[in-house]
Amino acid sequence: MSPSSFQVTSRLIDDVAIIYPRGYLNNLSGENIVSECARHAQAGVRKIIVNFRDTDLINSIGISFLLTVMEDLRDAGGTLCFSGMKKAHLDTFEMLGLTKYFLLFTDEDAALRALGGGQV
């Protein structure tokens, strides 16, 4: 998948926004995730799950955008969770010491249960 085919979609379940990035998460696509999360936050959503099930790669700039989302949401009193991360993603986050800053779940349903949102 080329960077130009990166897509971000989302849906709202109760008071939880679920973001679905698809493709290669880099500098250009990272801006799309920040915008999508900001759109939900501006609407009052304070619980966001980013589901990485369809994300092929995440580079260091993509990670920096995720940190921006986390900081912005934390400053607003919100929570950011990740689900569906591939082993390579988890290994990278662990190697960089980032796993202590994010709530990580194996799947979307587990994240929803933890946030108390949606009918799972």
Image (tube, rainbow, N blue to C red):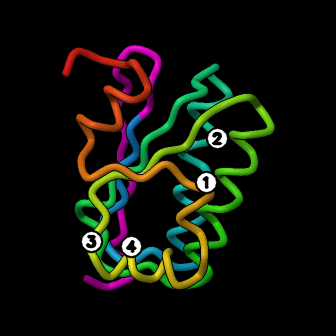
Q: Viewer-nearest of labels 4 and 2?
A: 4
> Which amino acid type is shown beneath numbered disc 2?
Ala
The local secondary structure at tag 3 comes to: loop
Residue behind mark 3 = 86
User: Do tag 3 and tag 1 residues touch (Cβ < 8 Å)?
Assistant: no
Cα distance, mark 2 to mark 3? 25 Å
Query: Which is nearer the N-term, disc 4 or disc 1?
Result: 1
> Which amino acid type is shown beneath numbered disc 3?
Lys
Q: Position of residue 96 (x, y in %)?
A: 59, 81
Query: Which is nearer the N-term, disc 4 or disc 2?
Result: 2
Q: Is residue 89 above or below residue 40?
A: below
Residue behind mark 4 = 90
Instruction: State which quarter of the image contains the C terminus.
Output: top left
User: Do tag 4 and tag 3 residues touch (Cβ < 8 Å)?
Assistant: yes
Query: Which is nearer the N-term, disc 2 or disc 3?
Result: 2
Residue at 59% x, 62% y: name it: 66
The local secondary structure at tag 2 comes to: helix
User: Do tag 4 and tag 1 residues touch (Cβ < 8 Å)?
Assistant: no
Residue at 38% x, 25% y: name it: 12
Q: Position of residue 87 (x, y in %)?
A: 27, 76
> Which amino acid type is shown beneath numbered disc 4?
Leu
Q: Position of residue 67 (x, y in %)?
A: 66, 62
Cα distance, mark 4 to mark 2? 24 Å
Cα distance, mark 3 to mark 1? 21 Å
User: Do tag 4 and tag 2 residues touch (Cβ < 8 Å)?
Assistant: no
Residue behind mark 1 = 34
> Which amino acid type is shown beneath numbered disc 1?
Val
Residue behind mark 2 = 38
Q: Judge the density around disc 1: few (<14), some (14-19), many (≥20) Cα neighbours within 10 Å.
A: some
